[in-house]
Image: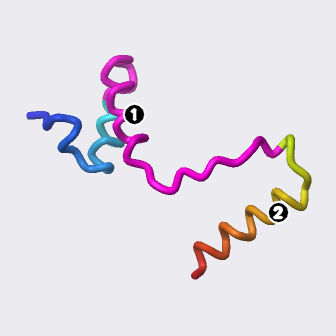
Amino acid sequence: MNKPLEEMTNVELRRYLSENRNDENAFSQALELLMSRKQNTTKYPSPLSMSYDEVEAIFKDKIKQISD
């Protein structure tokens, strides 16, 4: 008995992805739904185009957010 993808929790979707990794259509639909639920989608430029200090500042900021 499978629930519709929209009714699955994120944990259930990840399990579904694992179980259906060889079914391209099912995998794509589940992954798209899981990614659409993602919050805080801050996008950063490629680290290769950034200075060491810029990359270090991003990591320090993330560590601070986690520890607060």
Give the numbered dot on residue 31: 1
Check the image and tell me how it is coloured.
rainbow
Which quarter of the picture shows residue 46? top right
Which quarter of the picture shows residue 16? top left
- Percent of width and height locating residue 28: 39, 25
Q: Is residue 67 left or right of residue 10?
A: right
Q: Which residues are magenta?
A: 20-47
- Percent of width and height locating residue 42: 60, 52
Residue at coordinates 38% horizontally, 17% vertically from top-left?
24
> Mark 1: which amino acid?
Leu
- In this rendering, is residue 15 above or below 56? above
Residue at coordinates 58% horizontally, 73% vertically from top-left?
66
Rendered-image quadrant of the C terminus: bottom right
Separation of residues labelled 2 and 1 (CA atoms): 30 Å
> Mark 2: which amino acid?
Glu
Label 1 crowd (10 A; few <14 / some 14-19 / many >=20): some
Rendered-image quadrant of the N terminus: top left
Residue identifier under label 2: 56
